[in-house]
Image (cartoon, grey):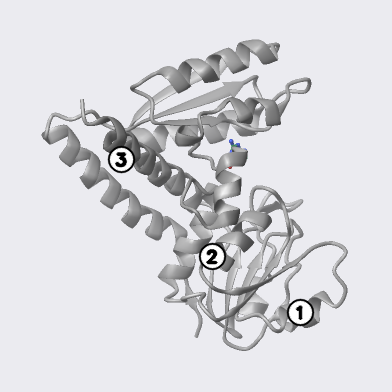
Protein backbone atom coordinates (compact mmCIF):
# COMPACT_ATOMS: atom_id res chain seq x y z
CA UNK A 1 0.00 0.00 0.00
CA UNK A 2 1.51 3.35 -1.01
CA UNK A 3 1.98 6.11 1.54
CA UNK A 4 -0.25 9.02 0.47
CA UNK A 5 1.27 12.32 1.61
CA UNK A 6 -1.35 14.83 2.72
CA UNK A 7 0.02 18.28 1.86
CA UNK A 8 -2.56 20.04 4.02
CA UNK A 9 -1.43 18.09 7.08
CA UNK A 10 2.27 18.58 6.32
CA UNK A 11 1.64 22.33 5.81
CA UNK A 12 -0.16 22.51 9.15
CA UNK A 13 2.82 20.87 10.90
CA UNK A 14 5.34 23.23 9.31
CA UNK A 15 3.17 26.30 9.94
CA UNK A 16 2.69 25.33 13.60
CA UNK A 17 6.50 25.29 13.98
CA UNK A 18 6.74 28.71 12.32
CA UNK A 19 3.97 30.13 14.50
CA UNK A 20 5.83 29.00 17.64
CA UNK A 21 8.97 30.78 16.43
CA UNK A 22 7.03 34.00 15.67
CA UNK A 23 5.21 33.82 19.05
CA UNK A 24 8.57 33.46 20.78
CA UNK A 25 9.92 36.56 18.97
CA UNK A 26 6.85 38.57 19.96
CA UNK A 27 7.08 37.39 23.59
CA UNK A 28 10.71 38.50 23.62
CA UNK A 29 9.63 41.96 22.38
CA UNK A 30 11.47 41.53 19.10
CA UNK A 31 10.48 42.64 15.62
CA UNK A 32 8.52 39.93 13.76
CA UNK A 33 8.95 38.85 10.08
CA UNK A 34 7.08 40.78 7.41
CA UNK A 35 6.14 39.79 3.85
CA UNK A 36 5.27 42.43 1.22
CA UNK A 37 3.10 41.31 -1.69
CA UNK A 38 2.81 43.52 -4.78
CA UNK A 39 -0.15 42.84 -7.04
CA UNK A 40 -0.76 44.78 -10.24
CA UNK A 41 -4.26 44.73 -11.78
CA UNK A 42 -7.30 42.56 -11.25
CA UNK A 43 -6.43 39.08 -12.58
CA UNK A 44 -8.96 36.96 -10.62
CA UNK A 45 -6.58 34.01 -10.09
CA UNK A 46 -3.86 36.38 -8.83
CA UNK A 47 -6.33 38.14 -6.51
CA UNK A 48 -7.28 34.78 -5.05
CA UNK A 49 -3.61 33.67 -4.63
CA UNK A 50 -2.76 36.96 -2.92
CA UNK A 51 -5.72 36.59 -0.54
CA UNK A 52 -4.46 33.09 0.31
CA UNK A 53 -1.03 34.53 1.15
CA UNK A 54 -2.56 37.26 3.35
CA UNK A 55 -4.66 34.68 5.19
CA UNK A 56 -1.67 32.38 5.72
CA UNK A 57 0.42 35.25 7.14
CA UNK A 58 -2.42 36.27 9.46
CA UNK A 59 -2.84 32.71 10.74
CA UNK A 60 0.79 32.72 11.92
CA UNK A 61 0.88 36.27 13.20
CA UNK A 62 3.36 37.12 10.44
CA UNK A 63 3.16 40.75 9.31
CA UNK A 64 1.92 41.29 5.78
CA UNK A 65 1.94 44.42 3.61
CA UNK A 66 -0.23 44.26 0.56
CA UNK A 67 0.37 46.77 -2.25
CA UNK A 68 -2.39 46.63 -4.85
CA UNK A 69 -1.46 48.74 -7.88
CA UNK A 70 -3.88 49.66 -10.65
CA UNK A 71 -4.00 47.77 -13.96
CA UNK A 72 -2.43 50.65 -15.92
CA UNK A 73 0.58 51.02 -13.60
CA UNK A 74 3.74 51.90 -15.53
CA UNK A 75 7.01 49.98 -15.32
CA UNK A 76 8.56 52.98 -13.53
CA UNK A 77 5.77 53.08 -10.92
CA UNK A 78 6.06 49.33 -10.28
CA UNK A 79 9.83 49.47 -9.96
CA UNK A 80 9.58 52.50 -7.66
CA UNK A 81 7.27 50.48 -5.39
CA UNK A 82 9.70 47.52 -5.39
CA UNK A 83 12.61 49.83 -4.49
CA UNK A 84 10.59 51.33 -1.63
CA UNK A 85 10.08 47.80 -0.28
CA UNK A 86 13.80 47.06 -0.74
CA UNK A 87 14.66 50.09 1.39
CA UNK A 88 12.01 49.52 4.09
CA UNK A 89 13.81 48.04 7.12
CA UNK A 90 10.58 46.48 8.39
CA UNK A 91 10.08 44.35 5.24
CA UNK A 92 11.91 41.02 5.04
CA UNK A 93 10.39 39.38 1.97
CA UNK A 94 9.02 40.79 -1.30
CA UNK A 95 6.81 38.91 -3.74
CA UNK A 96 5.65 40.42 -7.03
CA UNK A 97 2.61 38.40 -8.04
CA UNK A 98 2.89 37.03 -11.59
CA UNK A 99 1.77 37.25 -14.31
CA UNK A 100 1.98 41.04 -14.62
CA UNK A 101 -0.51 42.81 -16.91
CA UNK A 102 0.46 43.03 -20.59
CA UNK A 103 3.02 45.71 -21.32
CA UNK A 104 4.94 45.28 -18.05
CA UNK A 105 8.34 43.59 -18.15
CA UNK A 106 8.48 40.78 -15.57
CA UNK A 107 12.20 40.17 -15.85
CA UNK A 108 13.03 43.84 -15.35
CA UNK A 109 10.68 43.99 -12.32
CA UNK A 110 12.22 40.88 -10.75
CA UNK A 111 15.71 42.32 -11.35
CA UNK A 112 14.72 45.25 -9.08
CA UNK A 113 14.01 43.04 -6.06
CA UNK A 114 16.81 43.01 -3.48
CA UNK A 115 18.06 39.39 -3.76
CA UNK A 116 18.18 39.15 0.05
CA UNK A 117 14.39 39.83 0.11
CA UNK A 118 13.55 37.69 -2.95
CA UNK A 119 11.51 35.03 -1.12
CA UNK A 120 10.12 33.79 -4.46
CA UNK A 121 13.65 32.78 -5.55
CA UNK A 122 13.25 34.33 -9.00
CA UNK A 123 16.04 36.94 -9.06
CA UNK A 124 18.95 35.79 -11.28
CA UNK A 125 21.29 36.01 -8.25
CA UNK A 126 19.16 33.40 -6.47
CA UNK A 127 18.74 31.33 -9.65
CA UNK A 128 22.55 31.39 -9.99
CA UNK A 129 23.01 30.44 -6.35
CA UNK A 130 20.67 27.47 -6.79
CA UNK A 131 22.65 26.48 -9.88
CA UNK A 132 25.93 26.73 -7.94
CA UNK A 133 24.48 24.98 -4.86
CA UNK A 134 25.28 28.07 -2.82
CA UNK A 135 22.50 28.79 -0.30
CA UNK A 136 20.05 31.51 -1.37
CA UNK A 137 16.31 31.49 -1.96
CA UNK A 138 14.81 28.70 -4.06
CA UNK A 139 11.30 28.94 -5.57
CA UNK A 140 8.49 27.82 -3.28
CA UNK A 141 6.81 24.97 -5.20
CA UNK A 142 10.12 23.14 -5.78
CA UNK A 143 10.95 23.58 -2.08
CA UNK A 144 7.52 22.10 -1.32
CA UNK A 145 8.40 19.06 -3.45
CA UNK A 146 11.59 18.55 -1.42
CA UNK A 147 9.64 18.75 1.87
CA UNK A 148 7.18 16.16 0.51
CA UNK A 149 10.09 13.82 -0.32
CA UNK A 150 11.39 14.28 3.23
CA UNK A 151 7.94 13.33 4.55
CA UNK A 152 8.08 10.23 2.32
CA UNK A 153 11.41 9.34 4.05
CA UNK A 154 12.99 9.50 0.61
CA UNK A 155 16.60 10.72 0.61
CA UNK A 156 17.35 11.62 -3.04
CA UNK A 157 21.10 10.88 -2.64
CA UNK A 158 22.21 8.24 -5.11
CA UNK A 159 18.73 7.75 -6.52
CA UNK A 160 17.66 8.28 -10.10
CA UNK A 161 15.17 11.18 -10.36
CA UNK A 162 13.18 12.05 -13.45
CA UNK A 163 11.45 15.43 -13.75
CA UNK A 164 8.80 15.65 -16.44
CA UNK A 165 8.51 19.34 -17.37
CA UNK A 166 11.14 22.10 -17.58
CA UNK A 167 9.28 25.28 -16.59
CA UNK A 168 11.17 28.14 -14.95
CA UNK A 169 9.00 28.03 -11.81
CA UNK A 170 8.88 24.26 -11.26
CA UNK A 171 10.63 21.73 -13.52
CA UNK A 172 14.00 23.45 -13.91
CA UNK A 173 14.50 24.49 -10.24
CA UNK A 174 13.20 21.20 -8.80
CA UNK A 175 15.70 19.32 -10.98
CA UNK A 176 18.48 21.49 -9.57
CA UNK A 177 17.35 20.97 -5.95
CA UNK A 178 17.34 17.21 -6.57
CA UNK A 179 20.81 17.35 -8.08
CA UNK A 180 22.02 19.44 -5.13
CA UNK A 181 20.60 16.66 -2.93
CA UNK A 182 22.85 14.22 -4.82
CA UNK A 183 20.24 12.54 -7.02
CA UNK A 184 21.07 11.60 -10.61
CA UNK A 185 18.60 13.77 -12.49
CA UNK A 186 17.03 13.60 -15.94
CA UNK A 187 14.77 16.43 -17.15
CA UNK A 188 12.18 15.45 -19.77
CA UNK A 189 9.96 17.73 -21.87
CA UNK A 190 7.63 17.79 -24.85
CA UNK A 191 10.42 16.81 -27.28
CA UNK A 192 11.83 13.93 -25.23
CA UNK A 193 11.96 10.61 -27.09
CA UNK A 194 11.08 7.39 -25.25
CA UNK A 195 9.57 9.29 -22.30
CA UNK A 196 7.85 6.21 -20.92
CA UNK A 197 11.10 4.24 -20.93
CA UNK A 198 12.97 7.05 -19.12
CA UNK A 199 10.21 7.43 -16.51
CA UNK A 200 10.29 3.69 -15.82
CA UNK A 201 13.92 4.13 -14.70
CA UNK A 202 12.92 6.69 -12.05
CA UNK A 203 13.21 5.99 -8.33
CA UNK A 204 11.76 9.49 -7.90
CA UNK A 205 9.30 10.78 -10.49
CA UNK A 206 8.24 14.44 -10.45
CA UNK A 207 5.32 15.21 -12.76
CA UNK A 208 5.05 18.87 -13.80
CA UNK A 209 3.71 18.67 -17.35
CA UNK A 210 0.27 20.27 -17.10
CA UNK A 211 -1.56 17.38 -18.78
CA UNK A 212 -4.36 15.67 -16.82
CA UNK A 213 -3.57 12.04 -15.82
CA UNK A 214 -0.71 11.95 -18.33
CA UNK A 215 1.46 9.68 -16.14
CA UNK A 216 -0.18 6.27 -16.09
CA UNK A 217 0.98 3.05 -14.40
CA UNK A 218 3.10 2.06 -17.41
CA UNK A 219 5.37 5.07 -16.69
CA UNK A 220 6.14 3.86 -13.16
CA UNK A 221 9.01 1.80 -11.81
CA UNK A 222 7.70 -0.56 -9.12
CA UNK A 223 8.29 1.07 -5.71
CA UNK A 224 8.94 4.61 -7.03
CA UNK A 225 8.29 7.86 -5.11
CA UNK A 226 5.83 9.90 -7.16
CA UNK A 227 5.23 13.64 -6.65
CA UNK A 228 2.48 15.24 -8.72
CA UNK A 229 2.85 19.00 -9.23
CA UNK A 230 0.15 19.22 -11.91
CA UNK A 231 -3.03 21.21 -11.31
CA UNK A 232 -5.47 20.74 -14.18
CA UNK A 233 -9.11 21.81 -14.21
CA UNK A 234 -11.36 19.27 -15.94
CA UNK A 235 -14.49 20.18 -17.93
CA UNK A 236 -16.62 19.03 -14.95
CA UNK A 237 -14.88 21.68 -12.80
CA UNK A 238 -12.86 19.15 -10.76
CA UNK A 239 -9.12 19.50 -10.23
CA UNK A 240 -6.82 16.70 -11.24
CA UNK A 241 -3.07 16.15 -11.37
CA UNK A 242 -0.66 15.02 -14.08
CA UNK A 243 -0.65 11.52 -12.57
CA UNK A 244 -3.41 8.94 -12.91
CA UNK A 245 -3.55 8.50 -9.12
CA UNK A 246 -5.87 5.45 -9.09
CA UNK A 247 -3.80 3.53 -11.63
CA UNK A 248 -0.38 4.48 -10.23
CA UNK A 249 -1.00 4.23 -6.48
CA UNK A 250 -0.67 0.44 -6.27
CA UNK A 251 2.79 0.50 -7.88
CA UNK A 252 4.61 3.12 -5.83
CA UNK A 253 6.06 3.44 -2.33
CA UNK A 254 4.62 6.92 -1.83
CA UNK A 255 2.56 9.40 -3.83
CA UNK A 256 0.88 12.83 -3.53
CA UNK A 257 -2.78 13.41 -4.43
CA UNK A 258 -4.23 16.39 -6.31
CA UNK A 259 -5.78 18.41 -4.78
CA UNK A 260 -4.23 18.30 -1.30
CA UNK A 261 -0.67 17.26 -2.18
CA UNK A 262 2.04 19.70 -3.28
CA UNK A 263 -0.46 22.58 -3.79
CA UNK A 264 -0.83 23.62 -0.14
CA UNK A 265 2.96 23.45 0.32
CA UNK A 266 3.70 26.44 -1.95
CA UNK A 267 2.41 29.15 0.41
CA UNK A 268 3.94 27.35 3.39
CA UNK A 269 7.36 27.42 1.75
CA UNK A 270 6.87 31.14 1.01
CA UNK A 271 6.33 31.69 4.74
CA UNK A 272 9.42 29.56 5.52
CA UNK A 273 11.47 31.62 3.04
CA UNK A 274 10.21 34.84 4.66
CA UNK A 275 11.31 33.55 8.08
CA UNK A 276 14.72 32.67 6.58
CA UNK A 277 15.00 36.19 5.07
CA UNK A 278 14.10 37.67 8.47
CA UNK A 279 16.68 35.58 10.33
CA UNK A 280 19.42 36.38 7.84
CA UNK A 281 18.66 40.13 8.02
CA UNK A 282 18.60 40.05 11.80
CA UNK A 283 21.93 38.20 11.83
CA UNK A 284 23.40 40.90 9.55
CA UNK A 285 21.89 43.98 11.20
CA UNK A 286 21.02 42.88 14.73
CA UNK A 287 17.57 42.78 16.32
CA UNK A 288 15.76 46.07 16.77
N1 LIG B 1 1.97 33.19 -9.86
C1 LIG B 1 1.77 31.86 -9.87
N2 LIG B 1 2.74 31.23 -9.17
C2 LIG B 1 3.57 32.18 -8.71
C3 LIG B 1 4.74 32.17 -7.90
O1 LIG B 1 5.24 31.12 -7.46
N3 LIG B 1 5.30 33.38 -7.65
C4 LIG B 1 4.78 34.54 -8.13
N4 LIG B 1 5.41 35.68 -7.83
N5 LIG B 1 3.70 34.60 -8.86
C5 LIG B 1 3.09 33.43 -9.14
Q: CA distance from mark 1 to mark 2?
A: 21 Å
Query: Callout 1: few (<14), some (14-19), or many (20+) C-alpha neighbours within 10 Å?
Result: some
In the image, residue 233 above or below residue 90: below
Residue bearing mark 3: 279
Confirm or deny contact between disc 1 and disc 3 (CB under 8 A). no
From the image, state whether disc 1 or disc 2 is nearer to you. Answer: 2
Image quadrant in which the C terminus is located: top left
Label located before the other in sequence (1 or 2): 2
**In the structure shown, which secondary structural element does the residue marked by tag 2 occupy?**
helix
How many numbered discs, if any?
3
Identify which residue, 223 or 55, lies in the foreground. 223
Q: Quadrant of ligand 1?
A: top right
Frontmost of labels 1 and 3 is 3
Place of residue 87 in the rendered image (x, y in percent of width and height, measured from the top left): 43, 18
User: Looking at the image, which residue is at 28% across and 30% down?
Assistant: 285
Give the residue at x 46% y 22%: 86
Counting residues from the start of the chain, the first of labels 2 and 3 encountered is: 2
**Relative image position of residue 65 (x, y in whole percent):** 41, 22
Q: Position of residue 259 (x, y in %)?
A: 56, 57
Question: Label 1, label 3: how many angstroms apart (C-alpha)?
Answer: 41 Å
For mark 2, does the 10 Å Cα neighbourhood hold few (<14), some (14 to 19), or many (20 or more) residues? Answer: some
Depth check: give the residue in front, 138 or 151. 138
Amino acid sequence: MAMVVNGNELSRELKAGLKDRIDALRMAGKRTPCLAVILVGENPASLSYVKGKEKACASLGMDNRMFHLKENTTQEELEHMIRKCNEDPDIDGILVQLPLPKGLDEFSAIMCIDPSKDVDGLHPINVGRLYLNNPGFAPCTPLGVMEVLKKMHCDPAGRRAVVVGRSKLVGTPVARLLQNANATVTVCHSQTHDLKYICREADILIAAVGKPKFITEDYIKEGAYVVDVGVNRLSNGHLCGDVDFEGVQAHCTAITPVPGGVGPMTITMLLMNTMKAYEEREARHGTR
